[in-house]
Image (tube, rainbow, N blue to C red):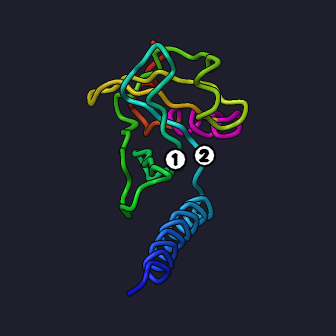
């Protein structure tokens, strides 16, 4: 096998992986997903953000990282006990890793803290989902 054939096989492999990422993202968005950036490791310099697609599954918010080969969610955020600690605009270095016009929410739950960044439409949907708690359950910020 020559160098040309090896290079061709490598390029074919890269093309297949890129096609898989594109297909997965489109499939998630068509199933009602929203563009969301997420980070669980906080850094003052704005690092640690990962782009992904969020999908509502009952009382869980499933987050799928864009560049992941796995078929399942990379993180599941439960609505039960989820509280929004702070809301802010992204800082300069963070803005590159977020959807356009994003707002950053710092959330806390029993499983830890996470920051979620989403655009205005996705934010409205997320807050509505969080407020639509089953009867008898209090809204985290209404007490």
Residue closest to the eye, 124 or 11: 11
Residue closest to the eye, 139 or 37: 37
> Which stretch appears magenta?
119-131
Image spot of residue 141 (x, y percent): 48, 17
Label 2 sits on residue:
35
Residue closest to the eye, 98 or 115: 98
Q: CA distance from mark 1 to mark 2?
A: 6 Å
User: In this figure, what is the number of numbered marks?
Assistant: 2
By secondary structure, the bulk of the magenta-drawn segment is best described as helix
Neighbour tally class for label 1: few under 14, some 14-19, many 20 plus, Cα within 10 Å:
many
Label 1 sits on residue:
52
Neighbour tally class for label 2: few under 14, some 14-19, many 20 plus, Cα within 10 Å:
many
Residue visible at 50% across and 79% down?
A: 8
Whether residue 121 appears in magenta in the rendering, the answer is yes
Residue 69, image quadrant:
bottom left
Q: Secondary structure at mark 2?
A: strand
Q: Quadrant of the C terminus?
A: top left
């Amino acid at each position: 096998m020559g160098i040309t054939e090896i290079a061709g096989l490598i390029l074919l492999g890269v093309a297949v992986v890129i096609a898989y990422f594109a297909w997965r993202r489109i499939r998630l968005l068509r199933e009602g997903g929203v563009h969301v950036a997420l980070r669980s490791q906080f850094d003052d310099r704005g690092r640690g953000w990962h782009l992904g697609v969020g999908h509502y599954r009952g009382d869980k918010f499933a987050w799928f990282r864009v560049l992941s080969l796995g078929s399942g969610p990379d993180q599941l955020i439960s609505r039960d006990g989820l509280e929004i600690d702070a809301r802010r605009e992204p800082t300069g270095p963070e803005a590159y890793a977020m959807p356009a016009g994003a707002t950053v929410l710092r959330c806390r739950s029993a499983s830890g803290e996470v920051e979620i960044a989403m655009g205005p439409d996705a934010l409205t949907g997320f807050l509505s989902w969080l407020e639509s708690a089953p009867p008898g359950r209090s809204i985290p910020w209404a007490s």
